[in-house]
Amino acid sequence: AKVEEWVDRVHSIGTMVAIEGVDVSPQQGGMVVEYFFESGDDVQKGAQLVKLDTSVEEADLANNKATLVQAKLDYDRQVNLVKKGAASQAVLDQTIAKRDSAAAEVQKVEAIIAQKTITAPFSGRLGLRRVEKGQYVSVGQALVWLQALEPIWVDFPVPESEVARFKIGSPIEITVDAYPGEIFKGKVQAFDARLNQDSRTLMV
């Protein structure tokens, strides 16, 4: 007989899940003029992925900026007239309202233009590209799948009778068929809120 260290283990087959994964889609519809990635690329947060046509919005922006310039000139003129007592405060208030409205229109169009450049919401790996130049895409249409690679969740079911042996922070070891012989270490982050009634297991 000899003394050995023995670790009481609970074995379970789990499912690996990316901590973040989304179908990247536009907030505005439009014609695709350029894309900046290929299927399977790794990208950083904020990287440009797709650019939609903004020619109409650019024209609207130029018009709104001209209106804003005129509104500011009218405001300055009315301020001087009010100081001299040649115009009423009510007229100045109307001029202020027109200036602020023109500024809001400029900001609105600038926001639409910005939304027509679709960027990566987080760093990760792209899936298959589902968009081509010249294609019209609508609001919410999936352009490409983006998935974060680190960290990775592993969801694994634990029998009801074994759940008490786990707590937040408990160490776990994971083996994956794709990497034979390697052991990946992790820790328990959370427990599901309810027990599976059919299998009497809790997802950890």
Image (cartoon, rainbow, N blue to C red):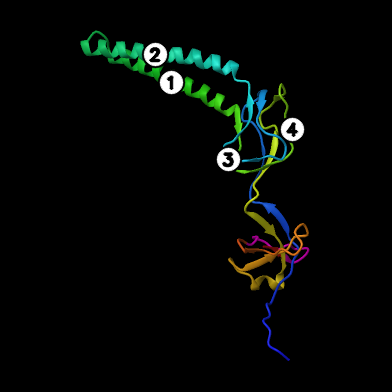
Give the class, few, some or many, for how many residues have Cα within 10 Å of label 2's Cα (few <14, many ≥20): many
Q: Which residue is mark 4?
A: 130
Residue 129 occupies quadrant: top right
Q: Which residue is mark 1?
A: 103
* C-beta proximity under 8 Å, tags 3 and 1: no
* C-beta proximity under 8 Å, tags 1 and 4: no
Q: Main secondary structure of the magenta part?
A: loop
- Magenta residues (range): 191-201
Q: Earlier in the sequence, mark 4 or mark 3?
A: 3
Asked whether residue 203 is drawn in magenta, I would say no
Residue 86 to residue 110: above or below:
above
Q: Secondary structure at mark 4?
A: loop
Question: x%, y% of residue 197?
Answer: 75, 63
- Distance from the alpha carbon under mark 2 to that under mark 1: 9 Å
Closer to the camera: disc 2 or disc 3?
Answer: 3
Q: Residue at x 66, y 34 (%)?
A: 25
Q: Which residue is mark 2?
A: 71
Q: Secondary structure at mark 1?
A: helix
Q: Secondary structure at mark 2?
A: helix
Q: Secondary structure at mark 3?
A: loop
- Distance from the alpha carbon under mark 4 to that under mark 2: 44 Å
Closer to the camera: disc 3 or disc 1?
Answer: 3
